[in-house]
Amino acid sequence: MAVKFKKLTPDLMVIDVAKTVKFYTEKLGFKLDMLVPENEKAIETKLANEKKYVYAMVSRDDVFVMFMRKDVYGEDVQALKGVPIGASATFYCDVDNVSALHDSFKENGVDIIKGISTTWYGMKEFYIMDFNGYILGFAEQTQ
């Protein structure tokens, strides 16, 4: 049987899972799919102010992003123990109506690090940085 890749979901190391979920849901329009509370083997779907979380997943349409608290990530994947948060990669997302998305992010106070522009390769795109230091690009085909 041939191997088939089905989906790639980034799993980002963060300091505060709840704060990160709030940023992605309140500022970027993602929806919360699931959370794992600290010291529990349970999946929840709503943030509770009195709880700390070690893992979460959010989505917007067909795009999914996971977050894992730094200390837990270092335990689960030993090669990441002591690695700083952030990335030498960007996450590039194809969207419809990139101008409207740009405007909504700007209205929500999102840190837009590269304004909207059209590239020579036919993409209209812009880039943001979340408060963890991750860079996300959003683009649509113009040709």
Image (spheres, helix red, strand yellow):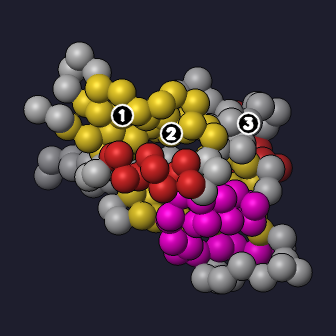
State if disc 2 and disc 3 touch (CB < 8 Å). no
In the image, residue 109 lies in the stretch drawn in magenta = no
Compute the Cα span from label 1 to label 3.
25 Å
Q: Which residue is mark 3?
A: 85
Compute the Cα span from label 2 to label 1.
10 Å
Judged by depth in the image, the label closer to the viewer, 3 or 2, is 2
Residue 30 lies left or right of residue 93; in this view the side is right
User: Residue at left 46%, top 65%?
Assistant: 59
- Residue 35 in percent (x, y) is at 65, 73
Closer to us: 19 or 81: 19
- SS assignment at label 1: strand
Closer to us: 40 or 52: 52
Judged by depth in the image, the label closer to the viewer, 1 or 3, is 1
Which circle marks residue 96 in the picture? none
The range drawn in magenta is 17-38
Residue at the extreme right of the image, as rendered: 50
State if disc 3 and disc 1 touch (CB < 8 Å). no
- Residue 124 in percent (x, y) is at 29, 33
Crowd tier of the residue under label 3, counting other residues whose Cα lies within 10 Å: few below 14, some 14–19, many 20 or above: some
Mark 1 / mark 3, whichever is N-terminal = 3
Compute the Cα span from label 3 to label 2.
15 Å
Which circle marks residue 136 in the picture? 2
The three-letter amino acid code for the residue at tag 2 is Leu
Mark 3 / mark 2, whichever is N-terminal = 3
Crowd tier of the residue under label 1, counting other residues whose Cα lies within 10 Å: few below 14, some 14–19, many 20 or above: many
Q: Which residue is mark 1?
A: 125
Say above or below: 27 vs 99. Answer: below
- SS assignment at label 2: strand
Closer to us: 21 or 3: 21
